[in-house]
Amino acid sequence: MKSFTNANPKNLAQALTLVQQARAGGKTAVLAGGGSDLLGQMKERVITPDVLVRLTSIKGLDQVKEDKGPGSGVTIGGLITLDALSRHPLIRRQYAVLAEACEDVATPQIRNVATLAGNVAQRPWCWYYRNGFTCFKAGGNTCYSVSGENAFHAIFGGGPSHIVHPSDTAPALVALDARFRIAGPAGERVVPAAEFFTLPTVDPARENVLKDGEALVAVMLPAAKAGTRSTYHKIMDREAWTHAVVSAAVVLHIDKDVCREARVVLGGVAPIPWRLPEVEKLLTGQRMTPELVAKAGEMAVAGAKPLAKNGYKVPLTQAMVRRTIEGLSAKG
């Protein structure tokens, strides 16, 4: 690992200033939360910063707060650990899909350190990017997975890069219609979760709209509606310490056995959390019959374009969406 300077700012403004000062002096600087992904990249020399600005020294960015006023929702600090978020009673009670997604990340040791913002903004785990290949994600102009090893790559939204977004919490947050509060040198801005993630066609080197020197500091969730049910289902190639081969975040608002509103978002199958609007339209206004749920599974894989070695993801996704919706709609 290349030597670097560790900075511990007292507040967010100082953290952003430290990054600007480093870059003004010709040095590279990165912001770090828990650092579980970042430090791995540094060890492998995927990235080699001169200055590491640790956000964990800043107080108050790891809290869950109910916003004031009726129907205001919840604000979650970006530096909250995944373990703390998964165990928070309010999140478990009203936003089960997010709590379950946090529980499914990696191992207990990592969840005790990894933050919500870090999980959302983590870089791809494609072996070409992580092992020194000059691919699109590393500033090159080639996606080696197209003709190489692609068993775990995208079946939706691929090209020119075919990575899959590695976050478990990202599909859950898109399904919950969350908003992200971002802070940077130009001030703060709020971006809907559905607009935060970007396809490779926008910029093959990036996965989201974060600009240099910006940080995801908070996640805002709308108030949970009565009758809302949600869950997160993840399929892995081994028991732990791995990312989703396929996952689904499903949020259903059910009233008198009729689905009034639906959000279905896939993980592990695309460069961004992959929302299924046609499946949502199919379910909305309908009673959750076995035939309807089976149709939802079929529609979930419409337009899939698998590569040479990941075609198995198509029937796997279809079956998982069907079983996840079926199980959730059966809950009283």
Image (spheres, rainbow, N blue to C red):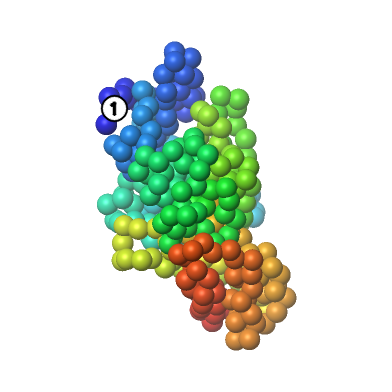
Q: Given the current orientation, which residue lies at the most extreme front position?
A: 147
Nearer to me, 46 or 29: 46
Give x and y (percent) for residue 35.
35, 39
* Residue located beneath label 1 in the image: 2
Residue 50 vertical position relative to residue 136 in the rendered view, above or below: above
Q: Is residue 133 visible?
A: yes
Q: Is residue 325 left or right of residue 92?
A: right
164 shown above or below 290: above
Q: Find the residue positioned furthest to the bottom.
A: 290
Q: Kindly indicate the quadrant of the structure image that contains residue 39.
A: top left
Choose between 109 and 149: the one closer to the eye.
149
Residue type at mark 1? Lys
Q: Position of residue 282 (x, y in %)?
A: 70, 74
Residue 57, image x, y percentages:
36, 31
The secondary structure type at the circle numbered 1 is loop
At x 41% / y 44%, what residue is drawn? 129
User: Is residue 268 rendered to the left or right of residue 289?
Assistant: left
- Locate residue 128 relative to residue 185 in the image: left or right: left
Q: Residue sitting at 31 percent across and 24 percent down?
A: 4
Q: Quadrant of the N terminus?
A: top left
- Front position in the image: 49 or 5: 49
- Which residue is at 62% across, 45% downward? 201
Location of residue 81 in the rendering, given as x and y in whole percent from the top left corner:
38, 47
Q: How many marks?
A: 1
Residue at horizontal 38 percent and vertical 49 percent from the top: 127
For the residue carrying disc 1, how many other residues have a C-alpha within 10 Å: few (<14), some (14-19), or many (20+)? few
Residue 222 appears in the picture as rendered? no
Q: Compared with residue 33, is residue 128 higher up or lower down, i.e. above or below?
A: below
